[in-house]
Image (tube, rainbow, N blue to C red):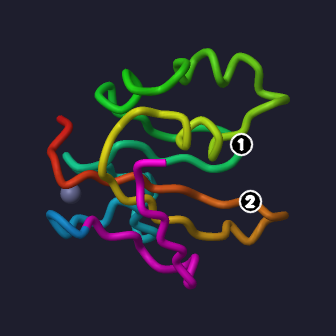
Amino acid sequence: MSFQLIQLENNQANVTCPYCHQDVLDWNQEQYIQPCTHTLFIAIDLGFEYISHVYEATMQRSVDDIHANDDNIDVFHEISSADYADYVVYSSALGVADLQRYVGLSAREVM
Ligand SMILES: [Zn+2]
């Protein structure tokens, strides 16, 4: 694994990019997913909500491939087997079943 996993305790709080301070998850917006230039991906255990091309290129298979077999998605496994180096993943509980949301952020701009 080439990322640092940070578990967030408050799943109601916005998730803010540490590099540009944009709210990448902004619960005040109807479209609450607001990727910044450092956002590698936003995902929940059931699938990807956002993926950057740069990050997807380092994954073992494409998001379309992963979603095509949606009975058997293991997002954490997919991000753990990507080759992208040195990034941070913020994880927070969705409050539904045992599902987690993951937000991957890199100090390098990816778009
Ligand atoms: Zn940012």
Stretch of the chain drawn in magenta = 1-17
Q: Label 1 sits on what residue type?
A: Leu
Along the line of sight, which residue is nearer the eye, 59 or 51?
A: 59
Give the quarter the ligand 1 occupies.
bottom left
Q: Give the image location of residue 80, x and y in percent.
A: 55, 43
Q: Which mark is residue 46?
A: 1
Looking at the picture, does residue 25 appear above or below residue 1?
Answer: below
Asked whether 13 falls inside the magenta stretch, the response is yes
Which residue corresponds to the image point at 52% horizontal and 77% vertical from the top-left? Answer: 8
**Tag 2 residue:** 99
Q: Give the image location of residue 23, x and y in percent.
A: 30, 66
* Contact (Cβ within 8 Å) of mark 2 with mark 1: yes
Q: Residue furthest front?
A: 1
Give the position of the C terminus as an image quadrant: top left
Category of crowding for the residue at label 2, using alpha-carbon neighbours closer than 10 angstroms: few (below 14), some (14–19), many (at least 20)? few
Identify the element where label 2 is drawn.
Answer: loop
Q: Give the image location of residue 55, x and y in percent.
A: 36, 32
Instruction: Kindly report the distance in space between the C-alpha atoms of the residues bearing marks 2 and 1.
Output: 8 Å
